[in-house]
Image (spheres, rainbow, N blue to C red):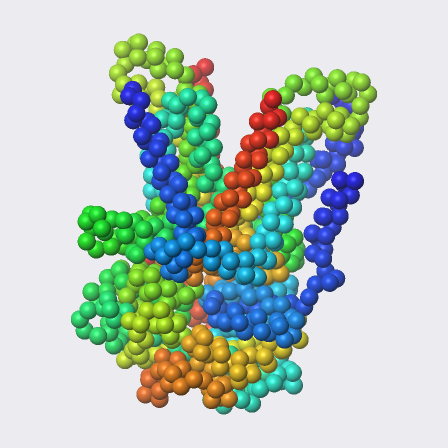
Amino acid sequence: MTRWLPRTYLALVYLLVYLPILVLVVFSFNESRTGYSWEGLSLRWYESLFNNRAMVGAMWNSLWLALSAATVSTVIGGLTALALHRYRFRGKKLLNGMLFVVMMSPEIVLAISLLALFLLVGLQLGYVSLLLAHVTFCLPFVVITVMARLSGFDDSLPEAARDLGASDFTMTRTVLIPVIMPALLAGWLLGFTLSLDDVVVSTFVSGPSYEILPLRIYSMVRVGLKPEVNALGTLLLVFSLVMLMLSQWILIRSKR
Amino acid sequence: MKKLVLAGLLAVGLTGCSSEEPQVLNLYNWSEYMPQTVLDRFTEETGIAVVYTTYDSNESMYAKLKLLDESAAYDLAVPSTYYVSKMRQEDLLMPIDRGEIEGFDELDPELTNLDIDPDNQYSIPYLWGTTGLAVDTSDVEGEPVKAWSNLWDERFEGRVMLTNDMREVFHVGLLVLGYSGNSTDPEEIEAAYEKLAELMPSVRTFNSDAPRMPYLEGETDVGMIWNGEAVMGKEIMPSLEYVYPEEGIIAWLDSFVIPKNAKNPEAAHKFISFVLQPEISALISEEIGYATPNLAARELLPEEVANNRASYPTATDMINAEFQADIGDEALQVYAKYWEMLKSGQ
Amino acid sequence: MHRVLQQPFKTAVLVLVWGWLLFLVLTPNLLVVGASVMTRDPGTFISLPLNLDAYRQLFDPLYLDVFLHSLYMAAMTTLVCLLIGYPFAWSLSKVGKQRQLLLIFLLIVPFWTNSLVRTYALKLILATNGLLNSALMPLGLIDEPLKLLYTEGAVIIGLVYLLLPFMILPLYSVFEDLRQELLLASHDLGAGRLSTFIHVIVPLTLPGVLAGVMLVLLPAMGLFFVPDILGGSRNLLVGNVIKNQFLDARNWPFGAAASIVLTVTMAFLMFAHRLSKRRLGEEGG
């Protein structure tokens, strides 16, 4: 087959994928209020973004939520993956199945089911409900990432450690954890981004005591064109790029 | 050491640094329905921070309050006329202590002590307004638009905007057919649905977050709008006119209420008093274009605001005006069903 | 291995994991099933008696229309994703290995930015006074600005934009596994290009197609914020209907029933995916 055809096609798709983002970044430096025409370079939207107290508050809330949700789901997800890999126990299939269901079911189904649960047990909608919900939808992704790493790992090493008299806990800590560390980090980063980006689940399980960024953005973009959103989007883009580069760097380094 | 730090961080996160938190007022209000300067000045004067959360319909406000009932999430909400009586009857509200409220006597007697809440035991009027026609005169050619029924004109195909408000949209449908906008008759509601379904090919968008925006952005040229939004829109786009339709305008009154389980009713009372100050009420009316029920504030308004027919209609403008009334849950269900169908736009 | 069974560490891990999943996955899903067979109650959301009214309402021709229309929107989205993604994954598999990784990375980067912000960026482009129209008008390609925003087309564009990577990634992985020898063998046996495509490439990449369809079709029915922003707040997706039932109209049984229909659709697709994989395994083995 000719070589230029696939390449041109790839280039075209990338152009389409990146065009909206490019527009967003360029227009975040636009002086214009209406947002459609170019009226000169300006940082005023970044300024007005940082002067918006509710926005900055929501940003911190979101970061803290993403940080804690990613951490908790990494701990639980990492342990789940270890359990699935190493132990034989009853109901393993059911456990696997439930994780699969979480990953595959539409977000909105997860959202309403969690809302029903929180109402039933009388949990106040706020940080805790958001944390529980976010950890739940991040969990399967961490499990899969770690499982993938474990499946390529030789089982003789942990057995050797055990034969040398190490307890199960010690063996896990000294042998397995270092092995799965890159996967844990990758899973953590994935969880962090998933949490930071989530709109659907958060719409249902958040309360006014803990306002988060995606919901703030949602109410902003529904009002209409707001140049502050461009500025915010650009900042988020830079932030996730840094995170993504970091994760790639960690993965590459760990392979050496 | 690392573990200790982590444990400490988690503990802080879970308790949310409770002890030294400043006082907070959780205000649940329509989007863009209070100038930021008012909130800032309130915080400056009282030290109480305001968390402003928004909704775009009475239905979603009500549903959220019911959801969050036990967790006492909001200290103050701003339902429209008919939702005040609905929420009062369903025992969702806390009585307002009039002794804590300053400036109640300044309110227009015609807008207090209404059937929706006799003697204002549960609600204090915030703003009132109307829903009428918006016309972008630079883009609408031919016959001037004077009535709701003009929206059905063929020339407006794909150019109409409706508010994202079930009761208001059906109000228009009912009015055009000559029924009351507060009809509870399922047959009349169905007829209104049929009528509105004919309008759907013309409807480009529903918007109750900021109904002026689709006009300003050039997406729509004619349709429904709230008077305050029309006033704000005209400042940016002078060709945007507010028209009182022949069939009659929709009128509403939005009032402060305190949800039954509010955590900080004290701050809520303070906030109401703060808004009732003539100077603040005047500032709000001037900035967002709706009419204040505060008579002392109206004295303070600049001439061009007080005489703006969009904000403050004349007696003739209000001839066919109809206030929205509570129609009961059964009729609401009928509306809700047809509303879902209408918005599915088949 | 038997010594492991008596470990406290293992017990602790299993209790934690099981506890989490039973409490936050199994129970909530059972609750939704329960809610769907109860009666709507204006005060407490749901109440007894048990009945199937919600399902009956769902299959009311009027609501069925909404569901089918949502399915149509999602199917169009999936189709467009497939039409873009299939040649994309194929082209990608023809590029050098090192460059492939970089290109995949570039594909995922936008996926890491907030999806609301990206949807909003599309609005900047599609609006009547937006960039697309202001680019096309001076070129003389159109006289009147195109009315793209607040249409079904805009919603499909938005959904495709958000979901494209989910179609491409599984497709890429099957194309990567596609062994070059097989294609050569087919060629040697005298099969033409088209015949090779139909008889060899399509069946071998089918599991990837189905995985992609699964990952796109269902989310496409649930992303309620896309019609909110790009579709003029119309109920174009089941997600909007479900959200309205829970957060506006307070008809929980109906909302729950609608979400169960979504789940059943998902189960059906997963079954089809498994079946296709198994059949392929049998043929190949």
Q: Position of residue C134 (x, y in %)?
A: 28, 52
Image quadrant holding the C terminus of chain C, namely top left
Give the quarter of the image for residue A207: bottom right
B101 or B309: nearer the viewer: B309
Q: Position of residue C222 (x, y in %)?
A: 45, 48
Q: Position of residue B151 (x, y in %)?
A: 26, 69
The residue lying furthest to the right in this view is: A165
Give the quarter of the image for residue A239: top right
User: What residue is rendered at 58% in x and 41% in y?
Assistant: A191
Q: Is any atom of residue B318 visible in this view?
A: no
Counting every numbered tag in the picture gives 0
Image quadrant holding the N terminus of chain C, namely top right
Query: Height in image: C59 above or below B219?
Result: above
Q: Is any atom of residue C267 visible in this view?
A: yes
User: What residue is rendered at 53% in x and 83% in y?
Assistant: B279
Q: Position of residue A96 (x, y in %)?
A: 59, 33
Drawn side of residue C269 relative to residue A167, left or right: left
Query: Height in image: C181 above or below B333?
Result: above
A105 or A256: nearer the viewer: A256
Drawn side of residue B101 relative to residue C194, left or right: right
Query: Height in image: A246 above or below B228?
Result: above
Give the quarter of the image for residue A251: top right
User: What residue is rendered at 77% in x and 29% in y?
Assistant: A169
Drawn side of residue C247 relative to residue B5, left or right: left
